[in-house]
Image (spheres, rainbow, N blue to C red):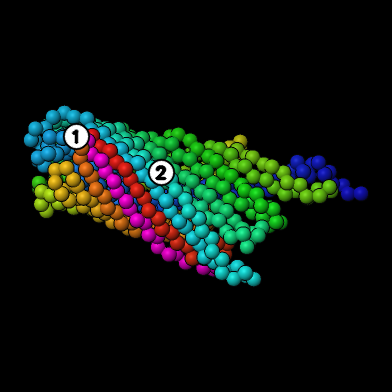
Amino acid sequence: MSSRDPEKEIRVQPERVKQFFMMLVFVLSFSGAAAAQVINYPVGSPTSTSGAGNARTDPDNFFLRNNIGGMTEFPSRAEEETGKLGVAGRNQWHFQADLQLATYRFSRDFAVPGLGPVSSDSRLGFPGFPVEAVYVAGSHRYAFGIGTYTMYAFESRLKDPASLGPFATYFDTRVASNDLAIGASVRLHPKISVGASFIIGRSYVVISQPNPALASIGILRQDRLDVSDWGAPGASVGVHYRPTERLSFGFNFKTQRSYHLDGTLTTAIPVVTPGGLQIIPVKPEVSVNLKPPRDYEIGFQYLPTDRVHLFGDFRYYEYPRTFQTIDVQDRQTGLVLFSLRLDAFDVRSVRVGGIYDWNRATKLEFGFAWTNNGFPAFAITPGTINTGGVDISAGISKRFHQYWLNFGAAGVIGFNRTITPVENPRFPGEYSGHGVMFNFGFRW
């Protein structure tokens, strides 16, 4: 007779395989962390100019998102009419909001022994809603404001064809940091303004992917990670320098922030018992550290004529400092169950744009942006498609009395990225993506 105690085995087995599923949590948490500033959400605010705005001083800019230092130069409504600051300036509140609607398609082409070429794809969409309210002194000596925006957002989804049977996978990843910023700026000199803002946000990571242990025995069942929290306080500091009336430069620095996300992992484990195979549901409490990186941005604005505004930004995201490792912790014990090196790359983005004042009631806008990928091949999964890419944008703004309405669109083209079986034996293939974003804006 066997000396094993079946009930004890069933009770102990979940603990013995707990680390295996914590590795899954790691993979999922990495999916959320790796998402920021990749092809899935490259278009910033304002949409019509691909987010370029570090040195801009026109009223269509989102100053708290791009560079709060230049907020003192926000023209009053009367000054916007004349195109000159200091003419009929007055203390005023300004408000603007953009509704952003995006849709993307992702694909992965790979080969399966015995089946040949296989293609996985999926289409998804998500909204954004940056809002900003600013108060500017008529003398332009100071300004303050409050704004909300999505600093980091990502959604990735891929579904394998039914021909793969029990090995068909479905990945659905959603992660975001929705931020609130409150700040002010002052003129130190007619040519120099500085500003700073306090940032706090809410982040979440919600990810569904196949249970690998059950899929290996022909059982399709999804695991789900759901973690979220408020917090991650940080700061943004900006400088705006205007050497001439037509040329200005901006510099903005955003600090590294840290979310400690708490939640659960809904999963199950297969256990062999004397009575046969049993599927044991498990829902451990977990925590994931998500750290938006430091962000350095510089930009310029040049006004060749009274009607033409040209501007551009360079942005550097310090991923190597933030995403070298990600720790997954057991909430009950506080122990770090896994710590994996990611070897993240520097992420750089170049954004340029322009505005043409067709007349006092109509503006034409355009933009272009390029962003590189930030993670090595071994880290790529269908839930963390990281290709880098470009976007091309255009828009039009129309004034109705004292209100402005804006419509813009941006086409997003992801770079094709080839992941070889040597680099990533789990998820090799040809990854690509493309999509479009529309925005509907209001300003007063």
Apparent side of residue 53 relative to residue 91 in the rendered image (left or right): right
Q: Please name whichever residue, 12 or 165, is drawn nearer the observer in this view of the structure.
A: 165
Give the left or right position of residue 314, taking residue 58 as reference. right
How far is mark 2 from mark 1, CA to CA?
A: 27 Å
> What's the residue at 8%, 36% (across, down)?
86
Kindly tell me whether residue 217 is visible in this rendering: yes
The total number of labels drawn is 2
Name the residue: 11% across, 32% down: 89
Look at mark 1 in the image and give the residue it sits on.
402
Residue 436 x, y percent position in the rendering: 37, 53
Q: Earlier in the sequence, mark 2 or mark 1?
A: 2
Expressed as whole percent of the image width and height from the top left, the position of residue 69 reads 22, 40
Which amino acid type is marked by label 1? Gln
Residue 127 got which mark?
2
Secondary structure, mark 1, is loop
Q: Residue furthest right?
A: 1
Residue range (magenta): 401-423
User: What kind of residue is marked 2?
Assistant: Pro
